[in-house]
Image (cartoon, rainbow, N blue to C red):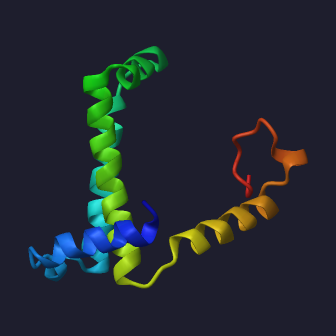
Amino acid sequence: MQFDDLNKEIREFCETRDWSQYHSPKDLAIGLSTESNELLDIFRFKSQREQLEIISNPDRQSEVEDELADVLFFLLRFADLHDIDLEDALETKIEKNRERYPKEEYESSNRKYNE
């Protein structure tokens, strides 16, 4: 499915439930943050080995997939309601990051561009 197809499906889902009234920019941002934190909670206080075990366990992986889907839902809904082209936004951001993080200077480094 492409973004357009996903947006259409989400739009129809929300419209049939009259949920647009709950989807202000602030509320969608809160939902995005909340769902991201639910994803984070799955891995909280886990070693890297335990994290990989979660991903390789079908039942636990399903939990991760559900949270990722929730994050994607809020992201797509926000973008759709406010005419944001996520593909274009991502391409623009990657180009900015290429300029901020030249390969020669940042390869194998996790420091931020302003550090």
Q: Nearer the viewer, residue 75 or 34?
A: 75
Q: Is residue 47 left or right of residue 98?
A: left
Above or below — where is 12 with respect to 113?
A: below
Numbered disc total: 0
Q: Which quadrant of the structure image shows residue 66?
A: top left
Q: Residue 19 at what x, y percent from top left? A: 14, 76
Going 44% across and 21% down the picture, which residue do you hit? Answer: 52
Task: Determine whether 112 is above or below 6 in the image.
Answer: above
User: Looking at the rendering, in which quadrant would you find the N terminus?
Assistant: bottom left
Q: Position of residue 105 (x, y in %)?
A: 87, 47
In the rendered image, which quarter is residue 17 located in? bottom left
* Residue 60 locus on image (x, y percent): 28, 26
Which x, y percent locates residue 2?
46, 64
* Residue at the image point whose x is 66% and y is 67% from the top: 91
Please indicate whether residue 101 sits to the left or right of residue 61 in the image.
Answer: right
Name the residue at 28% across, 68% down.
Answer: 9
Residue at 35% in and 39% down: 40
| Residue 32 drawn above or below residue 17 | above
Above or below, 46 against 93 in this view is above
Q: Residue furthest left?
A: 17
Residue 26 is left or right of residue 99, and the answer is left
